[in-house]
Image (spheres, grey):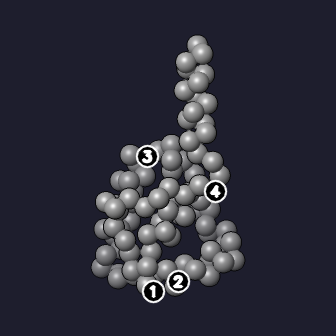
Amino acid sequence: QLRSENAALRQALAFRSGDVPTLSTSTHRFSGEPTKLREFLDSLTVYFAFQPTQFSHDRTRVGYLISALSGPALAWATPMVSSNDPVLSDYS
């Protein structure tokens, strides 16, 4: 029983509010090109699905997504980050 409790505690500590995992080199970056949007979102969906404990909260998913943006896409997202817009907690 001690081992299972220890495992549960480790899993609970794996996610702390505000932590954003580092961007995997296998995840595509997105600069805002409309024809690449679906590919980018699909790659994130797969990445999140294979790391459910790391991405169990919408805010973490959104933060990770924003960390993958560059160029015009990042310029679009920056005001939302600066103002702590509620959309940052809604990945849908």
Q: Describe the element under mark 1 as helix, strand or loop.
A: helix
The amino acid pointed to by label 2 is Trp
The image position of residue 26, as x and y in percent, is 31, 60
The residue indicated by pointer 1 is 72
Instruction: Kindly report the distance in space between the C-alpha atoms of the residues bearing marks 3 and 2.
Output: 27 Å
Q: Describe the element under mark 4 as helix, strand or loop.
A: loop
Seen as rendered, the residue at the extreme right is: 83
Image mark for residue 18: 4
Local crowd size for mark 3, using a 10 Å CA cut-off: few (<14), some (14–19), many (≥20) = few
In the image, what residue occupies the spot 58% across and 80% down? 78
The residue indicated by pointer 3 is 51
Image mark for residue 76: 2
Q: Earlier in the sequence, mark 1 or mark 3?
A: 3
**Quick check: marks 1 and 3 in contact, CB under 8 Å?**
no
Image mark for residue 3: none
**Quick check: marks 4 and 2 in contact, CB under 8 Å?**
no
Instruction: Kindly report the distance in space between the C-alpha atoms of the residues bearing marks 1 and 3.
Output: 28 Å
Q: Earlier in the sequence, mark 3 or mark 4?
A: 4
- Taking depth in this image into account, of 21 and 81 the one nearest to the observer is 21
Q: Earlier in the sequence, mark 1 or mark 4?
A: 4
**Quick check: marks 3 and 4 in contact, CB under 8 Å?**
no
The amino acid pointed to by label 4 is Gly
Residue 51 seen from this side: yes
The image position of residue 5, as x and y in percent, is 60, 22
The amino acid pointed to by label 3 is Gln
Residue 1 quadrant: top right
Instruction: Kindly report the distance in space between the C-alpha atoms of the residues bearing marks 1 and 4.
Output: 25 Å
Local crowd size for mark 4, using a 10 Å CA cut-off: few (<14), some (14–19), many (≥20) = few
